[in-house]
Image (cartoon, helix red, strand yellow):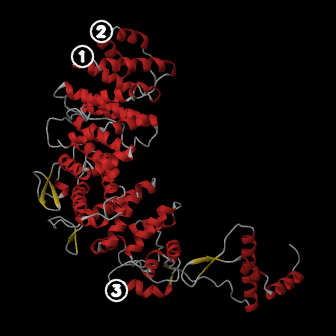
Amino acid sequence: MAMKVDLNSIIEQMETGEQDSALTALQSYNREMNHCFTFSKEDEQDRKILGELVLGFLNRDLQPSCHLACLETVRILSRDPLCLDPFVSRSAMSTLARFAGIAVSSPATGGHNQPEEGQAEGEEGERVEAAEECNEEGKENSPPSENADQEVITEALKSICNLLLHNETGQVVAADLQLIKGVAERLKQCHDPIWNHEVRFFDLRLTFLLTALRVEVRAQLVQELHGISLLGNQLEATLGLCWPDTVETARAGFEGAPPEELPLLSRQATERAMEILKILFNITFDTNRRKVDEEDAAEYRHVGAILRHCLLSQAEGEERNEEFHSHTVNLLGNLPLPCLDVLLMPKVHQGSIEYMGVNMDAVNMLLEFMESRLDQGRKLKETLLPSLNLLTESARIHRETRKFLRSKVLPPLRDVKTKPEVGNALRNKLVRIMTHIDTDVKDCGAEFLFVLCKENVSRFIKYTGYGNAAGLLAARGLLRGGRDSGIYSEDEESETEEYKEAKAHINPVTGVVEENQPDPMEGMTEEQKEYEAMKLVNMFDRLSRNNMIQPMQLGMDGTMREVAPEDLHKLAHNPLFQQEERNNSDSEPEA
């Protein structure tokens, strides 16, 4: 809600040029407007004038308290997308970068701010409000700054983030000023205790914004500034990790402790870790689609080992913990598939989940996370698919992972009287989404189960029913049966006694034993049966000619192909059908 402040009076005091008068006026304005996120249209020009005056004061040699008040005012004014012109010039952005300590020509220091996660894509008002709420929460819960400089740094970076969020010119200028270099220099100081939480957090938030909004900055961070290694070290320091083995991490001071005995990650550590995960996601989103050399693979495995620790760690607060794991899963999905073997490499410890001699703690955690998202049932495309795709690809390339997942998802089949989509077992839930209205969700669920069946059609149908499986089989050209081209071991399918006894009576379409149904054609002569069949063909022909349906038929190669209109027409005008139809019309009264 917009608040009424006497801007003319504040502007008059600023125009005097006196430091004390300006400081008093700005502090009053900042107190009144600190929680304001919407602005009146009538004061738009006055806010622009105030912004220009504040920038003038920032370029003067004044007391730190006056500079801090000016930067707080800039932060407030930068919430208004319509009044950013004074702040997005090269000189103005350079001034803000200098106070933030990230100007490439000055020593690196500082932090940054920006709205809550997703702000680059969410609704504008919500993004700004989320950002400022996060800022205020940080102030209330963080220890006081050790010196005023860190408050100045933080305020400057909050302003820069708001500008990047709302203004494309600001984004271009920030990229041109190489602000990412200044931020990267300070990120290298991840083990330096001088920087408080706010500075560290807003450094990461600014990096997230730059990489989310500017493709060239994304590439620069990866290639020139070694962003994967830089951010991996930052994540390691944030979580307080050590390395008992080359590919195994532990919380410093808790080496050898099982995951359930580790202390909860603090709110501040979790917030910084999530920012790092989001930045890494931005700069790795295409890596799983291309080959990487040995040096890059080593970096990704290093990150993967840290992500395994993230999966097995818990954060304070249920919602924050779920969000933390969600970002972890999203990033794991970006890593090159061969590098996911780090999830299985740690030794089996007491309390670990072991399968075929392999530590399955991380895979089991992924499976539980996927099921929890499936149970929530909201926005499945955004919430479920990252974890489901990750499990599918892991199962495809790692035999032990596939066998473990199959033991959990597709245990030996005993119940042959309940349809595959009915029930609360994980198999039932996944079969249900095979007929989901969203094609991506449907395909992803089917693909996961198909891979667990080693892409064997008969085994797939056994667990899902032909009706549920038809969509994937049609897309793969496997409606006639057989096996897809995946490379899997040739171990035999084990069947329970219950399944063996009922196998001959199972309806392959529904996947269950059904009660015997009366034959609808019982008592019909062959001519009557053919007549009914031709009536059906004639209906298909009429619907096809009216473009209401497209009849299909199964080709010899196992794929579906269109039935040509002339073929349907010939069938519909079969001489036998025409004669039967005439005889029928002579003997039956009109309805």
Instruction: Quote the CA–CA distance across marks 1 and 2.
Output: 10 Å
**Which is closer to the viewer, label 3 or label 2?**
2
Q: Quadrant of residue 116?
A: top left
Residue 143 x/y as whole percent: 19, 31
On the rendered structure, is 380 left or right of 94?
right
Please indicate, yes or no, whether residue 425 appears anywhere in the rendered image: no
Q: Residue at x 83, y 84 (%)?
A: 578
The C terminus is located in which quarter?
Answer: bottom right
Comes first in the chain, label 1 or label 2: 2
- The residue type indicated by label 1 comes to Leu
Residue 253 x/y as whole percent: 10, 51
Q: Residues within 10 Å of mark 2 (few under 14, many from 20)?
A: few
User: For mark 2, what is the residue?
Assistant: 18
Residue that extends furthest to the bottom in the rendered view of this protein: 526
- The residue type indicated by label 2 comes to Glu
Instruction: Quote the CA–CA distance across marks 3 and 1.
Output: 80 Å
User: For mark 3, what is the residue?
Assistant: 492
**Which is closer to the viewer, label 3 or label 1?**
1
Q: Residue at x 19, y 35 (%)?
A: 196
Instruction: Quote the CA–CA distance across marks 3 and 2.
Output: 87 Å
| Residue 159 - label | none
On the rendered structure, is 112 left or right of 122?
left
**Is 5 located above or below residue 474 in the figure?**
above
Q: Residue at x 19, y 43 (%)?
A: 188
Residue 151 x/y as whole percent: 24, 27
| Residue 62 - label | 1
Q: Residues within 10 Å of mark 1 (few under 14, many from 20)?
A: few
Comes first in the chain, label 3 or label 1: 1
